[in-house]
Image (cartoon, helix red, strand yellow):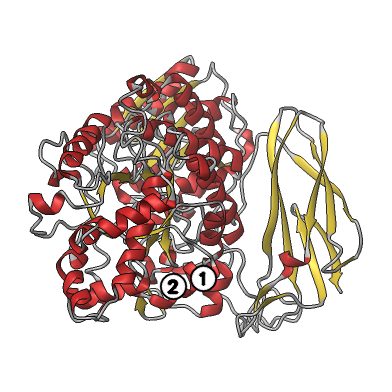
């Protein structure tokens, strides 16, 4: 439909019909739905009548094509103007084929894999009738106490930015062709803004930071997703500079709409409009509705502040009807861009065979590959890994047999479809004896005795440890980032046997691994790997896949060290300064300053040598970029993948600058003894940063370059 057609619809709509388009409801409000949908927030009494549901503009959390087609068909029977519903849901790391959690996808450092994951997720979700996904979450995260770090891609704004753009491309493809490309869906970037910085890592908590910090580190990934064409943005629950994001006119109008030039649909998170009252910046739901509409929030998710108050606010002149019209027009444009006016079912009725792609063998193979590439080898003492297939292996621990390996935000995935570690190991190793537990939180004496017995008869012990899926994700903050305490007694008992111990970890956040590390010969961070978890773990342990993941987020030495992140400032008394005193420096008395494992850390079964770092010049300018080349050689005897990372340090700035900043990376594959030259191009724009007055400019002066563990060089911006 052309713009004139949308304008004609808008002109014919009543105020009540317009306000209805701004309301998003769960499928349970529609008669005859087949499921209860997804519940991700409090269910207050909403007073939704049949008449109201017949005016609502969108549906949240439907799960099947049959349900969505039934709701749409009934809805259109009573829609005076024939405006179809649009169906949205949280497809965060897969629909039925569940991929590794996004933090694990960040650990692949592979933008092509991220795009592939999003593409497959879109194929399955659209085959089930969904049209919008509330993904990617691009919040920068530095505090693993926050359960939703699992939904981010880590602590670095550059890595988050390139991953965000990849997810958007994967979900949407060419955003101008969504009307005809029914296998793609609209992306919704979230949570705008700075939700990853909630104080103390506590869900829904306050965010407080300087404007310069917000612009420098937290906003770039959102902007990258928007530049990639994301059709929607979701507001955050938190305040920004003391004002709730959902009612923050400066944040949404000035920053999002004007500075970032976002012209798509802005949707609140679940209940966030009404929660402005709880924040204390609105006295009641009427004021919350006014503030949100003034801020430009187009869709109110699962509360009725707009529904109950906008008509009166417009009638008495408090709110201009133009604000309502612009919100409705953006919603109509989204529906039009998705081709819903021409086909409200987006091809489902014409091609029901599309659902055969869901959980297909091809998709399972893809998640197996991505899961293996996301796993990070943290320790491999005496090259205990990879394991020989003929070794007698004891597989023990609370994650040995379970299929609870999908992770949070996999609400449409079925654990019965998941491959356990037990099944994955049986498929690749000759002799595996297994003893598991029924819970990650409680281990009985009988379970402990059986695990010890099995372990004593083995050549090597694989210890499968970790969290339950529901221990991370939304509303799952924890104060101490350790494994469940019951598992430490088991670790001690297994360690005392004296056999080589390979620990495989399943978790949705960085953990304090200090005690565990000392009692393991090898440690593999598997995250929550998804549907093919057990096969992917076995691929790594057998050496079928050479581990190549790198940490996207630092692992603290202990909880008290949080926040700890790689691109920190040096402080006035850095502990590692050449003239540092022994005591009066910035340090802890009881632990190191450095995290247990740094951002970017990850071992391999082979080794890589970096040499011949060369610069095209020792100077860079606005007109002339700088080419930086390094040669990487696989010095081991097996093929492997290596992520080559380029860091830069601005030695003198108008504000204190980080010790180093990631500026480029490239993942390469090398056969034994193979070498490859990797070249990065840096421009003057890469050296810009936000000054105290928020000017985004660079400074003439000297910069350090760091690649690998020891190669450094200098150049000058003139």
Which of the 4 quarters of the picture holds residue 615? Answer: bottom right
| Residue for point 39% across, 43% down | 491
> Counting other residues with Cα less than 10 Å from the Cα at mark 2, is it few (<14), some (14-19), or many (20 or more)?
some
- Given the current orientation, which residue lies at the most extreme right position? 617
Image coordinates of residue 118 in percent, x first then y, are 48, 39
Q: Looking at the image, can residue 110 be seen?
A: no
**Could you tell whether 355 is left or right of 706 in the image?**
left
Which residue occupies 8% across, 49% down? 50
Give the camera-side residue of 640 and 23. Answer: 23
User: Of the residues under marks 2 and 1, which one precedes in the sequence?
Assistant: 2
In the rendered structure, are the residues bearing label 2 and label 1 in contact, judged by CB atoms less than 8 Å apart?
A: yes
Q: Quadrant of the C terminus?
A: bottom right
Above/below status of 560 relative to 212: above
Task: Give the residue displayed 10% in from the left and 52% down from the top.
Answer: 51
| Left-right relation of 563 to 567 | left
Residue carrying label 2: 253
Instruction: Judge whether residue 410 can be spotted in this image.
Output: yes
Q: Secondary structure at mark 2?
A: helix
Dot 1 falls on a residue whose secondary structure is: helix
Picture layout, residue 360 above or below residue 463? above
Give residue 524's position: percent from left, percent from top: 52, 40
Q: Can you say whether 385 is above or below 310 in the image?
A: above
Q: Where the N terminus falls, by quadrant?
A: top left
Q: Is residue 610 above or below residue 590?
A: above
Residue 69: x percent and y percent?
24, 33
Q: Is residue 700 left or right of residue 114?
A: right
Query: Closest to the observer: 17 or 365?
Result: 17
Q: CA–CA distance between discs 2 and 1?
A: 6 Å
**Residue at image location 43% in from the left, 67% down from the top:** 193
Q: Position of residue 553 (x, y in %)?
A: 53, 55
Quick one: 556 or 492, which is closer to the camera? 556
Residue hosting label 1: 258
């Amino acid at each position: 439909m052309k713009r004139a057609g949308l304008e004609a619809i808008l002109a014919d709509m009543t105020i009540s019909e317009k306000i209805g388009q701004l309301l998003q409801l769960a499928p349970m409000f529609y008669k005859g739905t087949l499921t209860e949908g997804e519940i991700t927030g409090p269910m207050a009494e909403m007073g939704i009548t049949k008449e109201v549901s017949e005016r609502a503009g969108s549906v949240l959390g439907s799960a099947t094509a049959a349900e969505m087609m039934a709701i749409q068909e009934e809805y259109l029977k009573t829609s005076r103007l024939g405006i179809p519903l649009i169906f949205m849901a949280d497809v965060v790391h897969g629909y039925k084929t569940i991929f590794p959690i996004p933090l694990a996808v960040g650990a692949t450092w592979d933008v092509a894999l991220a795009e592939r994951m999003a593409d497959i997720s879109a194929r399955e979700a659209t085959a089930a009738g969904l049209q919008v996904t509330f993904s990617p979450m691009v919040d920068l995260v530095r505090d693993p106490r926050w359960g939703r770090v699992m939904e981010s891609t880590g602590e670095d704004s550059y890595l988050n930015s390139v991953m965000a753009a990849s997810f958007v491309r994967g979900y949407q493809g060419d955003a101008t062709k969504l009307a005809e490309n029914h296998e793609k869906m609209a992306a919704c970037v979230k949570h705008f803004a700075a939700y990853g910085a909630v104080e103390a890592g506590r869900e829904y908590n306050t965010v407080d930071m300087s404007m310069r910090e917000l612009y420098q580190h937290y906003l770039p990934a959102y902007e990258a997703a928007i530049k990639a064409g994301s059709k929607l943005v979701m507001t955050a629950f938190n305040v920004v500079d003391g004002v709730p994001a959902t009612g923050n006119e400066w944040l949404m109008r000035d920053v999002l709409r004007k500075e970032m030039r976002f012209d798509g649909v802005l949707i609140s998170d679940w209940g966030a409009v009404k929660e402005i009252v709880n924040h204390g910046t609105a006295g009641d739901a009427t004021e919350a509705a006014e503030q949100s509409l003034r801020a430009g929030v187009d869709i109110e998710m699962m509360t009725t502040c707009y529904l109950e108050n906008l008509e009166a606010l417009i009638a008495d002149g408090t709110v201009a009807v133009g604000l309502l019209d612009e919100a409705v027009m953006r919603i109509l444009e989204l529906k039009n861009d998705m081709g819903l006016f021409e086909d409200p079912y987006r091809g489902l009725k014409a091609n029901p065979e599309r659902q055969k792609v869901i959980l297909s063998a091809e998709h399972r193979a893809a998640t197996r590959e991505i899961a293996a590439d996301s796993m990070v080898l943290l320790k491999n003492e005496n090259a205990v890994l990879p394991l020989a297939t003929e070794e007698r292996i004891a597989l023990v621990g609370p994650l040995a047999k379970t299929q609870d390996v999908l992770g949070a935000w996999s609400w449409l995935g079925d654990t019965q479809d998941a491959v356990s570690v037990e099944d994955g190991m049986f498929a690749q190793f000759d002799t595996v004896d297994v003893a598991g537990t029924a819970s990650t939180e409680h281990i009985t004496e009988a379970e402990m005795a059986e695990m010890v017995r099995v372990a004593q008869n083995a050549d090597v012990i694989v210890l499968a440890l970790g969290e339950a899926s529901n221990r991370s994700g939304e509303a799952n903050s924890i104060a101490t980032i350790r494994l469940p305490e019951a598992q430490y007694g088991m670790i001690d008992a297994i360690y005392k046997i004296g056999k080589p111990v390979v620990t495989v970890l399943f978790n949705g956040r960085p953990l304090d691994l200090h005690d565990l590390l000392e009692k393991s010969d090898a440690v593999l961070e598997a995250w929550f790997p998804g549907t093919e978890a057990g096969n992917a773990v076995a691929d790594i342990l057998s050496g079928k896949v050479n581990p190549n993941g790198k940490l996207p987020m630092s692992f603290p030495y202990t909880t008290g060290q949080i926040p700890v992140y790689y691109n920190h400032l040096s402080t006035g008394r850095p502990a590692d300064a050449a003239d540092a005193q022994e005591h009066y420096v910035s340090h802890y008395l009881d632990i190191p300053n450095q995290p247990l494992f740094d951002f970017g850390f990850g071992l391999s079964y082979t080794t890589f040598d970096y040499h011949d770092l060369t610069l095209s010049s020792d100077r860079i300018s606005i007109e002339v970029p700088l080419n930086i080349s390094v040669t990487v050689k696989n010095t081991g005897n097996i093929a492997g993948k290596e992520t080559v990372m380029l860091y830069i340090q601005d030695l003198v700035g108008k504000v204190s600058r980080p010790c180093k900043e990631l500026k480029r990376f490239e993942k390469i594959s090398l056969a034994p003894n193979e070498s490859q030259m990797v070249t990065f191009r840096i421009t003057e724009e890469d050296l810009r940063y936000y000054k105290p007055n928020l000017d985004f400019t660079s400074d003439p002066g000297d910069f350090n370059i760091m690649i690998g563990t020891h190669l450094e060089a200098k150049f000058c911006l003139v």
